[in-house]
Amino acid sequence: MRNIFFKIQVLTLIILSFLIISCNRTDDEVPNFPEGSTESVNVWVQDSMKRYYYWADYMPPKPNYHLPVKDFFKSLLLPQDRFSFIVNTSDTSTYPRSVRNMYGFDYAVLQLGNGEIATVIKLVLKNSPALNAGLERGMIIKKIDGQNITASNAEQLTSSIAEKTMIELTVGNWQNGSVVNEKNITVYYGYTFEQPLISKIFDKNGKKTGYLYIYDFPDGMSQALNQKFAEFKSAGVQVQIPVILTTQFQFKVTM
């Protein structure tokens, strides 16, 4: 049995999740390949892309079905497409190299009013190397491997994290316009994909507002989300504000 997940990021704020159960086709122009073969998987990839891909109209009409699945997928993409990728959920090596995938945290580089920058940790995944090392959402990264982060080197320093297997971070907490309680933390490489759901209820002028932070929407999160919204409802929340920073839809085939 083979499970393949597609994650295609699209330019919209709608999140969709699709489960495709079979690989049946009615298109006579495509040869019938043995079930379970690389070619049959590629046919399924093509069918799924035709249905869900934003730029489906620009896909090549006669692709090479004999390519490895990942190469076949790339051959269908619009050349300008920087957003789409394919992964095999049972093989971590197929995931894109990123700080989030490799260390279990993500960050944002913010421009401050005085012209300086602040690199803020915006997410720490469950059971991740980052969490085990002591990183927390809201911390400020001051240094990476001993180098101060500045406006001129922030992009280069932060992008270099994904190319390493160990990083030394100097972090602290933001307080009254400056970083306090600085400490050094070592984070080692290790894949993790367990996303925490961060929520809070604000009560102002007798009206309760529910805040829910969602980084993205992986498979299997529906139950956890339903539980969070049930908690909001039981607490008397009148307004619910989901914050979604990464928008993507994903669908799976089982063969």
Image: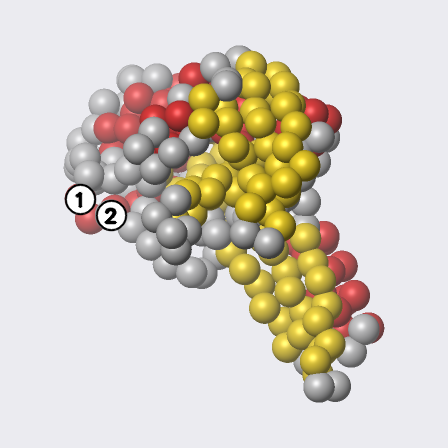
Q: Is residue 174 left or right of residue 53?
A: right
Q: Are marks 1 and 2 in contact (CB under 8 Å)?
A: yes
- Residue 242: quarter of image: bottom right
Residue drawn at the location 71% of the way across and 86% of the way down: 205
Residue 194 visible = no
Drawn side of residue 57 relative to residue 67, left or right: left
The N terminus, quarter of image = top right
Q: Secondary structure at mark 1?
A: helix
- Above/below status of 64 relative to 10: above
Label 1 amino acid?
A: Tyr
Residue 62 placement (x, y as % from top left): 18, 31
On the picture, is 208 further left or further right than 144? right
Return the x and y of residue 128 as percentages of the image width and height: 67, 28
Which residue was labeled with disc 1?
Answer: 58
Q: At 45% across and 22% down in the image, what residue appears?
A: 147
Residue 125 in the image: state x and y as whole percent. Answer: 64, 37
Q: Residue at x 28, y 28 (%)?
A: 74
Q: Amino acid at mark 2?
A: Trp
